[in-house]
Image: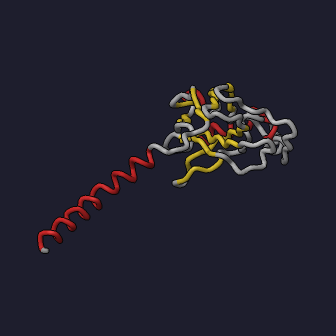
């Protein structure tokens, strides 16, 4: 009886020891892989440099995607200043969009996009584009470390696109550094 109890205790100990490994392994290989990929990003960009990248639909369904820039501040990821759907830059200028005929991304297809961090919203300042860009560069130059940013892709599926977001995919983070000539 004593020997049997030791065997049970040893088996329970092994299970407790190996269980975290099993959980981590399952979390790294989700059953539902990401529906899209973000490709072509560089590791660093200057303050107002255009970010060129591509979104590829790697799922088996037609998807509607929205792409937003995020910035790491105070220990969490938030929208970058003056957020807009990078796939639809007019979203920076209008409050509410109605997608009557949304541009779907077919399975296997990709779309090349460009994010202009210094695209000035009409309401941001009346002084013009160059003043708006200077204010961003000046804010960056006052930062003690490079600004960490990433892209977030919200994917939707369904004929009415009223369904909840299918998935959120995030790009690898990249850094914003100040232009040496602007200091």
Nearer to me, 102 or 7: 7
At x 75% / y 33%, what residue is drawn? Answer: 104
Residue 37 position by quadrant: top right
Regarding residue 141, the answer to whether it shows in the image is no
Residue 25 vertical position relative to residue 151 in the rendered view, above or below: below
Q: How many marks?
A: 0
Task: Answer left or right for 8 relative to 123.
Answer: left
Regarding residue 61, the answer to whether it shows in the image is yes
Nearer to me, 106 or 142: 106
Task: Answer left or right for 93 relative to 169.
Answer: right
Task: Answer left or right for 7 relative to 68.
Answer: left
Q: How is the image coloured?
A: secondary structure
Estimate the x, y position of residue 136 in percent, counting from the top left: 66, 39
Estimate the x, y position of residue 137 in percent, counting from the top left: 63, 37
Task: Answer left or right for 20 relative to 64.
Answer: left
Estimate the x, y position of residue 43 in percent, counting from the top left: 51, 31
Residue 92 position by quadrant: top right
Nearer to me, 78 or 39: 39
At x 13% / y 74%, what residue is drawn? Answer: 1
Residue 32 vertical position relative to residue 104 in the rendered view, above or below: below
């Amino acid at each position: 009886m004593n020997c049997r109890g030791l065997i049970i205790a040893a088996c329970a100990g092994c299970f407790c020891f190996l269980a975290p490994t099993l959980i981590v392994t399952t979390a790294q290989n989700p059953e539902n892989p990401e529906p899209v990929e973000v490709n072509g990003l560089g590791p660093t960009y200057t303050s107002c440099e255009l970010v060129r990248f591509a979104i590829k639909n790697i799922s088996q369904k037609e998807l509607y995607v929205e792409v937003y820039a995020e910035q790491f501040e105070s220990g969490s990821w938030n929208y970058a200043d003056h957020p807009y759907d990078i796939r639809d830059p007019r979203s920076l200028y209008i409050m509410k969009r109605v997608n009557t005929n949304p541009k779907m991304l077919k399975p296997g297809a990709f779309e090349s996009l460009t994010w202009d961090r210094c695209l000035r919203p009409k309401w941001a300042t009346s002084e013009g584009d160059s003043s708006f860009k200077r204010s961003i560069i000046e804010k960056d130059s006052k930062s003690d470390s490079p600004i960490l940013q990433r892209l977030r892709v919200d994917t939707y599926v369904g004929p009415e696109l009223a369904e909840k977001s299918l998935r959120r995919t995030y790009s690898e983070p990249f850094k914003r550094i100040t232009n040496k000539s602007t200091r």
